[in-house]
Amino acid sequence: MKKFIILLLIFSLIFVTAYVKNSTKKLEDEIFITKENLRILKKEFEKVKLEFDYLSSAEKLIEYQNLYFENELIPKKITEIKILNKKVFNEK
């Protein structure tokens, strides 16, 4: 009877160890994938932030206007800006 209990204990320990090891491996894989996704998103964020900071400054926009468009751009008031609907384009 003692041998049976010892064998049962050993097999249960082996089973529990295997279960814990597999669970840990799955968690490690999920953490790795999350870190990789986060790394990619951080790179994308840096690019978008750089673009926003670079293009959103008034000085840069005026410089681009003078450099590329000369007198082609004219200022508009916000009240003059209209929203176009798809229906307007489809009817024409």
Image: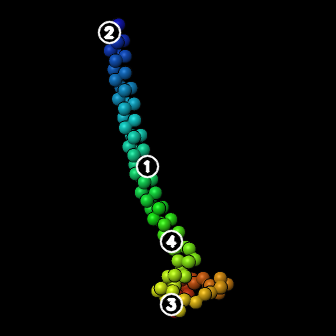
Mark 3 / mark 2, whichever is N-terminal: 2
Q: Residue at x 42, y 49 (%)?
A: 35
- According to the image, label 4 marks what residue? 54
Residue 55: % across, % down: 51, 74
Of 47 and 38, nearer the camera is: 47
SS for dot 2: helix
The answer to the question of whether label 1 and label 4 lie on touching residues, with beta carbons closer than 8 A, is no
Rate crowding at label 1 as few (under 14), some (14 to 19) or many (20 or more) other CA atoms within 10 Å: few
Which of labels 1 and 3 is toward the front?
3
- The part of the image, by quadrant, that contains residue 22 is top left
Figure check: 79 above or below 50: below
Mark 1 / mark 3, whichever is N-terminal: 1
- According to the image, label 1 marks what residue? 34
Q: Residue at x 35, y 29 (%)?
A: 18
The answer to whether 82 appears left or right of 53 in the picture is right
Rate crowding at label 3 as few (under 14), some (14 to 19) or many (20 or more) other CA atoms within 10 Å: few
- According to the image, label 3 marks what residue? 70
- According to the image, label 2 marks what residue? 3
Distance between mark 3 and mark 4 Cα atoms: 20 Å
Figure check: 75 above or below 16: below
Q: Quadrant of the N terminus?
A: top left
